[in-house]
Image (cartoon, rainbow, N blue to C red):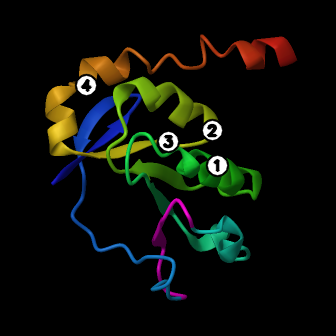
């Protein structure tokens, strides 16, 4: 089981089978990307996808941050979730690069309750780079 984390807190993750990039069919509206997948492979398909999950094999592997940023730069407007063992300390950066939230294992949710994630939900208030650009 897993938990969806958003600015609103925790919610149970729906149990759905989501295809990988290699298994993606024209009918699919969701896809799981590995942190090594090239988002350009989804060019021309982003408008029909409503959910993209980008895998974090470990909290210390940040390549998925780049994948998320590229998807948003390419124009993806659907739900974008980090998938895997990310930690609450990373939530602010997840949101800044374009993730809408994260799908984390139950074990991490038990160790880091919703309050720890929500503490970082004010990511816009402390985004000094955006303030400098304004």
- Label 1 Cα neighbours within 10 Å, binned few <14 / some 14-19 / many ≥20: some
Q: Name the image quarter holding the C terminus.
A: top right
**Is residue 134 in view?**
no
Image-based side of 37 in relation to 106, left or right? right
Characterize the magenta stretch by its predominant secondary structure: loop
Q: Earlier in the sequence, mark 4 or mark 1?
A: 1
Judged left or right of residue 134, residue 83 is left
Q: CA distance from mark 1 to mark 3?
A: 15 Å
Residue at image x 29%, y 74%?
17
- Could one spot residue 64 in this view of the protein? yes
Q: From the image, tell me which residue sits under label 4.
A: 114
**Quick check: marks 2 and 1 in contact, CB under 8 Å?**
yes
Disc 3 target residue: 100
Q: How far separated are the C-alphas under marks 4 and 1?
A: 25 Å
- The label number, if any, that marks residue 97 in the structure image: 2
Mark seen at residue 66: 1
Label 3: how many residues lie within 10 Å, few (<14), some (14-19) or many (20+)? Answer: some
The span picked out in magenta is 26-36
Q: Earlier in the sequence, mark 4 or mark 3?
A: 3
Where does residue 67 sit, x and y in percent of width and height?
62, 55
Q: Residue at x 20, y 25 (%)?
A: 113
Q: Position of residue 30 (x, y in %)?
A: 46, 70
């Amino acid at each position: 089981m897993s938990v969806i984390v958003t600015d609103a807190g925790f919610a149970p993750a729906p149990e759905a089978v989501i295809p990988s990039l290699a298994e993606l069919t024209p009918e699919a509206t969701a896809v799981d990307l590995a942190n090594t997948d090239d988002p350009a492979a989804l060019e021309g398909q982003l408008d029909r996808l409503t959910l993209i999950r980008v895998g974090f094999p470990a909290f210390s592997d940040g390549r998925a941050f780049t994948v998320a940023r590229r998807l948003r730069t390419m124009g993806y407007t659907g739900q974008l979730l980090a998938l895997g063992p990310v930690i609450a300390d990373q939530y602010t950066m997840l949101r800044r690069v374009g993730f809408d939230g994260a799908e984390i294992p139950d074990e991490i949710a038990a160790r880091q309750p919703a309050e720890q994630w929500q503490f970082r939900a004010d990511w816009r208030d402390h985004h000094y780079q955006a303030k400098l650009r304004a």
